Amino acid sequence: MPRRWPTWQRWLSTLAWLVLLAWLPWWLGLPILLALAAIVTLLQHRLDDEHVQLIRHALRWGLPGGLFAVQRALGGDVLAWGAALLGALAGYTLLAGLEAWLDRALRRGAATSKATAAEWPELAFAPVGPSVDIIELLPPAWQSAAEDLRDPCAGRVDYRNGSYQFADGSGVDRVGPNAVFSASGRWFVARMPHDRGIVLWDRQRNKRHRMRGWQLVGWHRDQPWLARNEHDMPQALATVLDEPGTGRTSNDTDVSV
């Protein structure tokens, strides 16, 4: 699990970061901030959520330190302070745009859920309609890593440092301490840290799917059904993976909404 620092340690480290950038020359501090912005922009999907949030926090609090170094280099007079304030306006405007871009998936998911929230109950209780297969979902029985998590296919499952380890040496990384097996043991599902999505492992085909922004609603015929929230209409995993814009690799799928 991610380590949570006490509040006073977080504020102390933030203050130390701000003072460091204010003390460094501007031609050294500002490139550091630009490098952090480039990393979080280009490598967002390869970074853990905890690291993305840490970089965003560093950008928010490092910018004032870098601007202070700029005005100090300009002589510290009224003109220098004016230039620093203009830099703050431009810098935080760009930072707001960057954060809006990083959160685009969450906003799209919320907008879609809001649009379908009123439609799903009406469809569910409509008295007239074509004959369809009635789908009854079996709710997932989530278990905590603190419990004795048993593999239905045999063996015990251990959870260490954000990873589940199985008896045969396989495992699932970068997940939280809550997980569930399907009835047959073919599927293993674990929640991502901070409930930002789930990781599904098809053990029969050895394929892992990192579903950012999705929740496991239940099981039907030993297959996972997903939704973005409790008000959204559940969808089979195959339907979700066939949506436009879904990226695939040979053994892993990373899906963002």
Image (cartoon, rainbow, N blue to C red):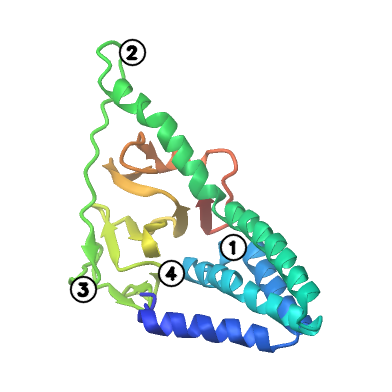
Residue drawn at (36%, 36%), measured in percent from left and top? Answer: 232
Q: Which residue is mark 2?
A: 130
> What separation in Å lies between label 3 and label 2 (alpha carbons)?
47 Å
Say whether disc 2 or disc 4 marks the residue closer to the N-terminus. 2
> What separation in Å lies between label 2 and label 4 (alpha carbons)?
43 Å
Tag 2–tag 1 contact (CB < 8 Å): no
> What separation in Å lies between label 3 and label 4 (alpha carbons)?
17 Å
> What separation in Å lies between label 2 and label 1 (alpha carbons)?
44 Å
Q: Check disc 3 and give the amino acid type.
A: Ala
Q: Which residue is mark 1?
A: 44
Q: Residue furthest top?
A: 128
Residue 201 makes an appearance in the image: no
Q: Position of residue 43 (x, y in %)?
A: 63, 65
Label for residue 146?
Answer: 3
Residue drawn at (66%, 84%), measured in percent from left and top? Answer: 22
Position of 164 relative to 218 (above/below) = below
Say whether disc 3 or disc 1 marks the residue closer to the N-terminus. 1
**Residue 69 occupies which quadrant of the picture?**
bottom right
Q: Which residue is mark 4?
A: 174
Q: Position of residue 162 (x, y in %)?
A: 38, 74
